[in-house]
Image (cartoon, rainbow, N blue to C red):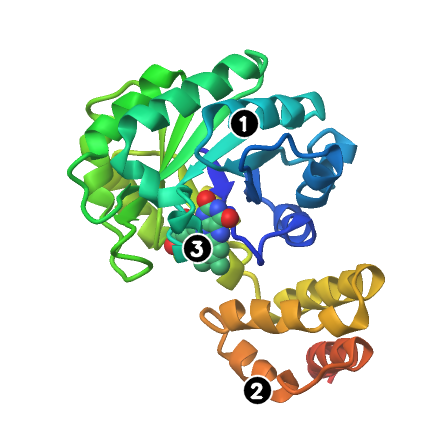
């Protein structure tokens, strides 16, 4: 079984990847999307999105990180994929799932699901441009407005030579509205040989099992569920108990500390609040902490608030 941490723009960056992969259970990560238009991007752009390139494209705990590209120009995507591979990317992922209006308006992301022929050309160009040992994976939704062309798209990706296909089981029109239609993925797995990874709305081990049954995929990609419950991958793999809030607080403190060391003070509180917004979906305590810290703008005060909260548990334990 393979569990992949979903790419999430503005949320899952190298800092977050380091924390979540250290918890365990994650086999692969994908960067936020790197937007490709017509230019060959300079190496610094790839290093910015994927600082792990300085360390063999691995997170500090040794999990491979693939670089995700988003665009519609086969040649430009191929050139940039080749550059990312030269810089040592563990793999290249192509984004045909992004629902953002501005991205779609510029012919990027999920809008291309209406153009299977172009998707085929992109995948084939990228596959040809990178060494055979570098995997090329593709991430899609079920479709743009509807899923009528899902099989056509899947065949285009398979014939283009991709190594794996991730399917977020919703159309662009369905946005993020539950449910995810895992059973629709099974229609693809029965028709192509390409390994398929299921994605969307997996919040618990039971969701994983249900997704697996309906999608016929053993491998899944976890996004918001893993941010809400950082031990979800471990729980799925080993059937372990969830991480206590006290341990999640330690992760949160480590995250704030890393932000203090690497961000301007102005930007060093937002990401913690954002993560608390996900954590509160799993831990009721996170909602209380978020309410308590939401007006804090000084990162040292924020760290103090998190540590004070963690201290309460130590005091309770020693009492
Ligand atoms: C805030 C946010 C940012 C995202 N950014 C990306 C991205 O950069 N690339 C991508 O392929 N998908 C992106 N996604 C989609 C996720 O990778 C994933 O497909 C989606 O969240 C469904 O999985 P989940 O229900 O497990 O969260 C993003 C989703 C969210 C919520």
Residue ID for mark 2: 291
- For the residue pair 294 and 125, the one nearer the viewer reads as 125
Residue ID for mark 1: 76
Residue ID for mark 3: 102
Residue at the (69%, 81%) spot, across then down: 309
Residue at the (52%, 52%) spot, across then down: 8
Residue 90 figure quarter: top right
289, above or below 115, in the image: below
Residue 311 figure quarter: bottom right
Q: Position of residue 154 (x, y in %)?
A: 28, 27
Instruction: Judge: label 2 CB < 8 Å from ligand 1.
Output: no
Q: Is residue 74 visible?
A: yes
Q: Please identify the residue farthest to the left as the structure is shown.
A: 148
Q: Position of residue 316 (x, y in %)?
A: 69, 83
Residue at the (69%, 32%) spot, across then down: 57
Q: What kind of element bears circle 3?
A: helix
271, above or below 239, in the image: below
Q: What kind of element bears circle 2?
A: helix
Q: Is residue 242 visible?
A: no
CA separation, marks 2 and 3?
A: 32 Å
Instruction: Judge: label 1 CB < 8 Å from ligand 1.
Output: no
Q: Earlier in the sequence, mark 2 or mark 3?
A: 3
Q: Earlier in the sequence, mark 1 or mark 3?
A: 1
184, above or below 291, in the image: above
């Amino acid at each position: 079984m393979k569990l992949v941490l979903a790419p999430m723009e503005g949320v899952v960056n190298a800092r977050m990847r380091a924390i979540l992969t250290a918890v365990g259970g994650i086999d692969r990560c994908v960067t936020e999307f790197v937007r490709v238009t017509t230019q060959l991007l300079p190496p610094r752009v790839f290093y910015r999105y994927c600082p792990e390139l300085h360390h063999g494209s691995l997170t500090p705990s040794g999990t491979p990180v693939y670089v995700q590209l988003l665009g519609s120009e086969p040649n430009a995507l191929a050139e940039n994929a080749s550059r990312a591979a030269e810089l040592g990317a563990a793999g290249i992922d192509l984004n045909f799932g992004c629902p953002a209006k501005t991205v779609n308006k510029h012919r990027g992301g999920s809008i291309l699901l209406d153009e299977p022929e172009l998707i085929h050309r992109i995948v084939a160009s990228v596959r040809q441009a990178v060494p055979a040992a570098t995997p090329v994976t593709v991430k899609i939704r079920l479709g743009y407005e509807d899923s009528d062309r899902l099989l056509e798209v899947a065949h285009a990706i398979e014939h283009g030579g991709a190594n794996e296909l991730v399917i977020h089981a919703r159309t662009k029109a369905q946005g993020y509205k539950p449910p995810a239609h895992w059973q629709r993925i099974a229609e693809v797995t029965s028709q192509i040989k390409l390994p398929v990874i299921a994605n969307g709305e997996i919040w618990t081990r039971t969701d994983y099992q249900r997704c697996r049954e309906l999608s016929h995929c053993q491998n899944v990609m976890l996004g918001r569920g893993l941010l809400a419950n950082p031990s979800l991958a471990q729980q799925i793999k080993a059937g372990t108990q969830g991480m206590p809030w006290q341990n999640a607080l330690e992760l949160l403190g480590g995250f704030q500390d890393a932000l203090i060391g690497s961000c301007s003070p102005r930007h060093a509180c937002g990401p913690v609040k954002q993560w608390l917004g996900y954590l509160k979906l799993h831990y009721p305590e996170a909602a209380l902490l978020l309410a308590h810290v939401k007006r804090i703008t000084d990162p040292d005060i924020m760290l103090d608030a998190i540590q004070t909260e963690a201290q309460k548990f130590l005091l309770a334990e020693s009492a």
